[in-house]
Image: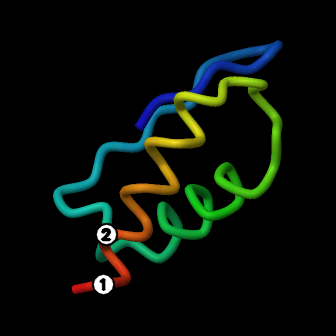
Amino acid sequence: MADTYESGVGVYAVRDPARSPGVLRNLEWLAREDVYKDREFRREVTAWLEQRRQH
């Protein structure tokens, strides 16, 4: 996962994001908040989180 900010770039590299509490919290926040105004990204994140919850 990568993110850009006004003053920099953030990158998360984890073997299994579904097992990383920090990544999950961040993805859940991104799915709720409209920080990017990028509907496709939010849709993908929401779908991934839903798929993960079903397993």
Q: Quadrant of the N terminus?
A: top left
Residue shown at 75% from the left, 27% from the top: 36
Point out the residue furthest to the left here.
15
Relative to 48, 4 lies left or right: right
Image coordinates for residue 35, horizontal then vertical, percent:
82, 35
Q: How is the image coloured?
A: rainbow
Name the residue located 30 percent from the left edge and 84 percent from the top edge. Answer: 54
Q: Quadrant of residue 32?
A: bottom right
Q: Position of residue 50 (x, y in %)?
A: 42, 70
Q: Residues within 10 Å of mark 1 (few under 14, many from 20)?
A: few
Q: Secondary structure at mark 1?
A: helix
Label 2 packing within 10 angstroms: few (<14), some (14-19), many (20+):
few
- For badge 1, the amino acid type reads Gln
Residues under numbered marks 2 and 1 in contact, where contact means CB atoms less than 8 Å apart:
yes
Amino acid type assigned to the residue bearing label 2 in the image: Gln
Calculate the distance from the C-alpha at mark 2 to the C-alpha at mark 1: 5 Å
* For residue 9, side relative to residue 36 (left or right): left
Task: State whether residue 35 is above or below residue 5.
Answer: below
Instruction: Locate the C terminus and report the quarter of the image it occupies.
Output: bottom left
Q: Which mark is residue 44?
A: none
Reply above or below: 22 against 40: below
Q: Nearer the viewer, residue 55 or 35?
A: 55
Left or right: where does residue 43 sit relative to residue 8?
A: left
The vertical placement of 36 against 21, above or below, is above
The x, y position of residue 21, in whole percent, is: 47, 76
Q: Position of residue 7 (x, y in %)?
A: 80, 14
Q: Nearer the viewer, residue 32 or 6?
A: 32
The answer to whether residue 45 is above or below residue 35 is below
- The secondary element bearing badge 2 is classed as helix
Identify the residue under disc 2.
51
Disc 1 target residue: 54
